[in-house]
């Protein structure tokens, strides 16, 4: 939901990224400030209040991490979104612990998520102000609040802020474990997530206020799994905060006491949270109560993560094939072309259209076996494309039985080679439909945006489309490459 009149600050050294975000945010009803470096951004923050700052992680001079620190000190009411590349994900993830609310990857930029994320941030700011007012009134009534209670309030606020953002299951489990270990008087805390709709493999997050030996860590993981009380199907993925394990074994002791609470949302158990002690001292009722409250928050947060992921998929994915949809492909392509222009690299696009043979085509399958069989065939074609491309490539359903592939950092030879692999993957192995083998072929068009004079998204896609038509006009079942001046056309 757009909050009209709210001001957003965009900090990025790339002019094309600033312009892209400015156009989009203004269209969404926000007022936008622009800064090409950290120093300029801090000057703008001194003269105007911004509710959100979108900050590039890597910039000359003051980098995004330092800008984040300065904003937290100078303008604590301003929330920060970090922009990052694939190679900077680990650093970007650490910014969450420094106070960033969210981060976007430039390589898979999803503009449709921006208003959703910013809307949630602004709503959370309003709730935070109301909470701060309530906390102030409570402090006025009781100025002698115990130190332990102050720590509890701080932890509740910390987990509430962290879990409202779109974190992965592993990161969210760590945040929940850290919040629990900071509130409950324990030697370690663990969070186990087992719900299959949240994670294909169970996740076990282990947190301690001190370094644990490897023996301690394995024993804690075993205690966590045993407390679940049911088979997991596979060993959990164990995640821990950085620099926490110790190779020192002599002081290792068994976990003498532990308490566990299930993470539940709408009466469905998604996992459990556990606190453990190595000392011979049971947990107090107060500690168990705190574990219960934070476990309740954790269950709701896990469900919100699932719902947010589903909402994101509905906005970006084709419902039949699971591939990216037409609109999101153009968003990815525009972001990739902007990055390629900044770094002086090529971008490839492959257009694939299934050939319309009277006996062997999607229409023939629909007519002979029904549309459910045709839908199953489209899903199988999509699966072959998805498993043939590189991890960095993006496959989308363009419409009907047409597909399109974004190939970052790829020149003509590399893009053509990938197109030929896709062509062979379609034609060399028959598809099985209703117990019958169906041999299909496809025509593919390839275009590449040169590194010195990049194309617009429409130009690059239109050239790939023309190349696809040339492949069909030349007899179908082939790959055609078309360069910008159209004087060099190659077909295979």
Image (cartoon, grey):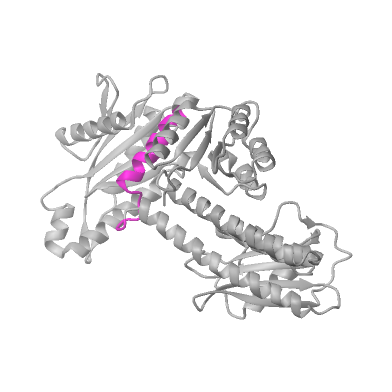
Q: Residue 184 lies in what quarter of the image?
A: bottom right
Check if residue 324 falls in the magenta segment.
Answer: yes
Q: Residue 187, image x and y in percent?
A: 79, 67
Q: Left or right: 487 with respect to 142?
A: left
Q: Residue at the location (16% across, 32% down)?
A: 474
Q: Which residues are magenta?
A: 319-340
- Residue 435 lies, in percent from the top left, at 22, 66
Q: Position of residue 50 (x, y in %)?
A: 55, 40
Q: Is residue 250 left or right of residue 486?
A: right
- Residue at image position (16%, 64%) is 370
* Quarter of the rendering containing residue 213: bottom right
Q: Is residue 340 visible?
A: yes
- Residue 369 lies left or right of residue 167; in this view the side is left
For the point 36% across and 52% down, which residue is it?
315
> Toward the viewer: 178 or 447?
178
**Where's residue 252, x and y in %?**
85, 67
User: In this view of the protein, which residue sits in the foreground, 304 or 250?
Assistant: 304
């Amino acid at each position: 939901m757009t909050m009209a009149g709210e001001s957003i600050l965009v900090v990025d050294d790339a002019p094309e990224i600033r312009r892209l975000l400015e156009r989009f945010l203004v269209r969404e009803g926000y007022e936008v400030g622009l800064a090409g470096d950290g120093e300029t951004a801090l000057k703008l923050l001194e003269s105007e209040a911004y509710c959100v700052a979108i900050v590039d992680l890597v910039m000359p001079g003051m980098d995004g991490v330092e800008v984040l620190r300065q904003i937290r000190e100078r303008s604590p009411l301003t929330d920060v979104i970090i922009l990052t590349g694939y190679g900077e994900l680990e650093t970007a993830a650490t910014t969450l612990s420094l106070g960033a609310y969210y981060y976007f990857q430039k390589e898979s930029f999803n503009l449709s998520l921006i208003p959703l994320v910013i809307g949630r941030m602004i709503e959370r700011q309003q709730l935070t102000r109301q909470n701060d007012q309530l906390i102030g009134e409570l402090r006025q009534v009781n100025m002698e609040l115990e130190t332990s209670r102050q720590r509890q309030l701080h932890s509740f606020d910390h987990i509430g802020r962290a879990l409202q953002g779109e974190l992965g299951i592993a990161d969210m489990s760590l945040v929940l474990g850290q919040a629990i270990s900071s509130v409950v008087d324990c030697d370690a805390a663990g969070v186990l997530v087992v719900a299959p709709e949240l994670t294909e493999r169970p996740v076990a997050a282990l947190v301690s206020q001190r370094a644990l030996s490897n023996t301690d860590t394995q024993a804690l993981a075993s205690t966590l799994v045993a407390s679940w009380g049911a088979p997991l199907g596979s060993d959990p993925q164990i995640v821990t905060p950085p620099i926490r394990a110790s190779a020192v074994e002599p002081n290792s002791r068994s976990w003498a006491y532990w308490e566990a609470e299930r993470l539940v949302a709408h009466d469905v158990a998604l996992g459990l949270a556990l606190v453990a002690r190595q000392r011979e001292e049971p947990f107090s009722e107060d500690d168990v109560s705190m574990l219960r409250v934070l476990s309740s928050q954790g269950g709701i947060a896990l469900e919100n993560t699932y719902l947010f992921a589903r909402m994101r998929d509905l906005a970006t994915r084709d419902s039949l094939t699971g591939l990216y949809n037409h609109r999101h492909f153009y968003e990815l392509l525009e972001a990739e072309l902007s990055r390629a222009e900044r770094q002086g690299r090529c971008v490839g696009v492959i257009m694939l259209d299934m050939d319309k043979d009277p006996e062997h085509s999607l229409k023939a399958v629909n007519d002979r076996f029904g549309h459910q069989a045709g839908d199953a065939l489209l899903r199988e074609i999509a699966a072959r494309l998805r498993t043939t491309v590189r991890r960095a490539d993006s496959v989308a359903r363009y419409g009907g039985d047409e597909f399109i592939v974004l190939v970052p950092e790829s020149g003509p030879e590399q893009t053509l080679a990938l197109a030929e692999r896709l062509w062979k993957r379609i034609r060399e192995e028959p598809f099985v439909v209703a117990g019958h083998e169906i041999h299909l072929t496809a025509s593919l068009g390839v275009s590449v945006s040169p590194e010195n004079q990049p194309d617009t998204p429409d130009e690059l896609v239109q050239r790939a489309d023309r190349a696809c038509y040339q492949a069909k006009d030349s007899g179908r079942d082939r790959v055609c490459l078309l360069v910008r001046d159209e004087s060099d056309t190659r077909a295979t």
